[in-house]
Image (cartoon, rainbow, N blue to C red):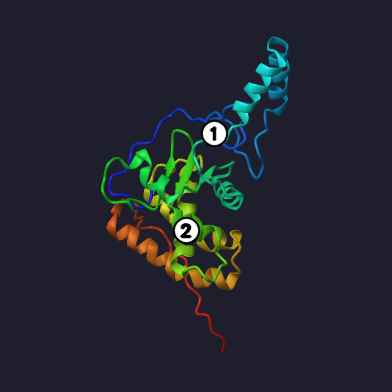
Amino acid sequence: MVGKEHEADLECEALKWRRAAEVPTRARAGDPLQHGSLWQPIHDRARGAIRRLALRLGPLALAFVLLLLAAPSASAYERPPLLQTVAGYFALRPAEVRCPSMEEWVGDPIWGTSPNPARAWGYTDMINEHIVLHPALCAGAMAVSDSTLPLWQRATGTLVLVHETYHLRRWKWRRNEAKVECQAIRHFIVSAQLLGASPELANELLPFALAAHARMVTLFPEYRDRRCRLPLWTLPMTP
């Protein structure tokens, strides 16, 4: 979790796959990592189940069941495809990224009853395997090339997104905030370009990412990896 003084204990050995598209099997610890591909959907099994249901129920009852299945979720979370693609690139597997409304963000049960509505920049649910970002940071990460948004918003959104993806990645340091944050800042330039920034814009955003990183590790020492080699900003000038 990024930027929260008292982290909720979301860690659990049991892993559940819950994405917008369901998956047929659950990944096991020894399974090979998935690179750039989606898990096989269960459309065929669903069709078979519906056919069997049709034999047992009348057409009106079946129509009612299908209407319930098609009903929209009560949650208004957005799951931007671009953010999920970039998150999957760093997580080395499909990744679910949720962008809540401000009402959902403040009302998220993970925050408890603390009066501070900001609380954090984002978090990774280690039980249900998804990322949730602050609404302003979701907007920044989704619009890295939008010059109408502040540079800090676009840079911090990118940094926090990548930070959380390294919590999803199945590597030995996924629960170590210092190692995760080091990877996030070291891969900032690449991540900004994957989100649509030009090399020049990624370099322009880097000082703001470094500032957000410095703030984080100063306020929360557990995020500091003293061996981390930070990326170097390039002076944007010609001879």
Task: Left or right? Give the position of 54 relative to 73.
Answer: right
For this orientation, the residue located farthest to the bottom is 239
Classify 10 Å Cα crowding around label 1: few (below 14), some (14-19), many (20 and above). Answer: some
Q: Nearer the viewer, residue 86 or 55?
A: 55
The percent position of residue 33, horizontal first and vertical second, equals: 59, 38
Callout 1 amino acid? Arg
Of residues 54 and 180, the one nearer the viewer is 54
Residue to which mark 1 is pinned:
18
Q: Is residue 235 above or below residue 180?
A: below
In this view, the residue farthest toward the top is 56
Image location (x, y in percent) of residue 36: 65, 45
Q: Which quadrant would the C terminus be assigned to in this image?
A: bottom right
Camera sees residue 165: yes
Asked which quadrant contains residue 226, the reply is bottom left
Residue 143 in picture, x, y percent from top left: 55, 62
N-terminal of the pair, mark 2 or mark 1, is 1
The residue beneath circle 2 is 157
| Mark 2 vs mark 1, CA separation in Å | 23 Å
Which residue is painted at 60% across and 59% down in the image? 194
User: Could you say where residue 82 lies in the image, as x and y percent from the top left?
Assistant: 60, 52
Q: Residues within 10 Å of mark 2 (few under 14, many from 20)?
A: many
Q: Quadrant of residue 193?
A: bottom right
Q: Which element is circle 2 on?
A: helix
Please give the name of the residue rendered at 49% of the width and 42% of the height, measured from the top-left corner. Answer: 168
Answer left or right for 54 relative to 131. right
